[in-house]
Image: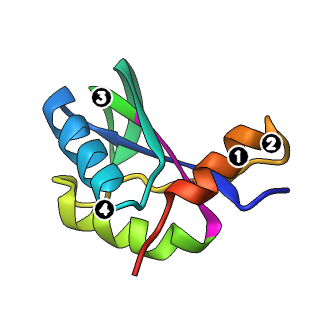
Amino acid sequence: MTDARIVLTTTDSREEAEKIANALVHRQLAACVNIVGPITSIYSWKGKVENAQEFLLLIKTTEDAFEPLRDAVRELHSYELPEFIELGISRGEGKYLAWITQSVHYE
């Protein structure tokens, strides 16, 4: 396991996805954010099954940046309860993983 992590969140528009991605990289909470979509999400919300078009953000960050990154996503996101899931990276290209770690700085 490395210190590098991937965090997932979704938005309802490309504009919001780009706004969040740009802010996270500029704040050095993420080394890189990929935006995938549109995707179709089918989910349960407030007792109903919903079907929505969304954009998935794949946020490359570090374990130590989890809390400030979560706080930034909460601040920037329009959803009442944004998805925020951290995935550990067990292995990867060493230089790439080092780049992630070197690129993420938070205070």
Q: Nearer the viewer, residue 80 or 74?
A: 74
User: Residue 43 lies in what quarter of the image?
Assistant: top left
Amino acid type indicated by mark 4: Arg
- Measure the C-alpha gap from mark 1 to mark 2: 5 Å
Nearest-to-viewer mark from 1 and 3? 1
Q: Is residue 9 left or right of residue 61?
A: left
Is disc 4 in contact with disc 3, using a CB cutoff of under 8 Å? no
Which of the marked residues, 4 or 1, is nearer the chain's N terminus? Answer: 4
Density class for disc 3 (Cα within 10 Å; few <14, some 14-19, many ≥20) is: some
Q: Is residue 33 magenta?
A: no
The residue under label 2 is 94
Q: Nearer the viewer, residue 54 or 5?
A: 5
* Dot label at residue 48: none
- Measure the C-alpha gap from mark 4 to mark 3: 24 Å
- Magenta-tinted stretch: 57-63
Which of the marked residues, 2 or 3, is nearer the chain's N terminus? Answer: 3
Amino acid type indicated by mark 2: Gly
The residue under label 4 is 27
Residue 15 vs 66, above or below: the answer is above
* Dot label at residue 54: 3
- Measure the C-alpha gap from mark 2 to mark 4: 24 Å
Coloring applied to the structure:
rainbow
- Measure the C-alpha gap from mark 2 to mark 3: 32 Å
Residue at left offset 24%, top offset 53%: 23
Residue that lies at the very extreme toward the bottom in this rendered image: 107
Which of the marked residues, 2 or 4, is nearer the chain's N terminus? Answer: 4
The residue under label 1 is 97
Q: Nearer the viewer, residue 54 or 92?
A: 92
Is disc 1 in contact with disc 2, using a CB cutoff of under 8 Å? yes
